[in-house]
Image (cartoon, rainbow, N blue to C red):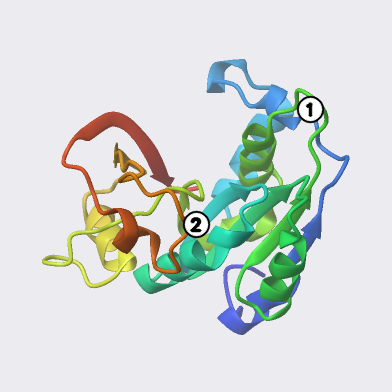
Amino acid sequence: DWSSDVCSSDLIKNRFTDIKNNYDDIYHTSKGYDLISTEEKILHSFRRSIPPIMNSAVVATARNEGVYLLDWISHYQALGFDDIFIYSNNNSDGSDALLKALSDNGIIFWINNDIPPLGDAQSKSYSHALMLNEQILNYRWVAFFDLDEFLFINEKFFNTVNDFLSWHDFYDTDIIGINWTFVGSKSELFWKNDEMYKRFGFDSLINPHVKSIIKP
């Protein structure tokens, strides 16, 4: 019964999922509501009947991001997200071992994936997250960000991302669009062992494109 008697410690279980060679065509079913199948409408209806018991999670896709993973994960932990889901595919940099260690120790949820030639890693991963990953239903809010994207909130008004999301709850919001601001290389040519946002800083220009935080 997801609506009662489920404590957060229960969610530590089953932090690894292997979907390699499965669901390769799942994103073809992700269409506008008027175009989706009857089966998918029924699925959406059932999902709405399950009340969330956690506040927030962030979902990302990763391939060969081993040198950036800990920095990115630490950033989103510091923001206050309850959990982190990482879909990886076709890694060849040894980062599978790091992802396994992180999931084995309850730090992330790792979904291991393979993408065939000309496949779409993000579409498959995000479609799986929103259609088939039952754990995603545990969270009121789910954010979708890439491994080169770092969310920042205004610390004058919000202590954590959950404070920020609760403020949006007050206005009965279902989706939040977060604008990009581009950060260039700052002419760096060599690796520095420091946090990404300390190495590169921010530019002032705001891009009209958005990433989404949604109620799944």
Would you say residue 20 is visible in this rendering?
yes
The residue beneath circle 2 is 58
Which quadrant of the figure has residue 93?
Answer: bottom right
Give yes or no for contact between labels 2 and 1 (Cβ–Cβ under 8 Å).
Answer: no
3 or 212: nearer the viewer: 212
The residue at the far front in this view is 189
Mark number displayed over residue 155 = none
Image position, residue 83 (x, y; %) = 53, 68
Quarter of the image where one finds residue 79: bottom left
Lower position in the chain sequence, tag 2 or tag 1: 1
User: Looking at the image, is 12 positioned above or below residue 155?
Assistant: below
Mark 2 is on which residue type? Val
Question: Which corner quadrant holds the N terminus?
Answer: bottom right
Residue at 73% in and 77% down: 104
Left or right of residue 142, residue 87 in this image? right
Task: Tell me what residue is drawn at x 56 percent, y 50 percent.
Answer: 60
Comparing 168 with 47, the one in front is: 168
Q: Please identify the residue farthest to the left as the structure is shown.
A: 156
Residue 164, placed above or below residue 25: below
Neighbourhood count class around disc 2 (C-alpha, 10 Å): few under 14, some 14–19, many 20 upward: many
| Residue that lies at the very extreme toward the top in this rendered image | 35
- What's the CA distance linking mark 2 and mark 1? 23 Å
Identify which residue, 212 or 9, lies in the foreground. Answer: 212
- Residue type of the residue flagged with mark 1: Asp
Q: Which residue is mark 1?
A: 25
Task: Find numbered disc 2 in the image and state the secondary structure of the residue it sits on.
Answer: strand
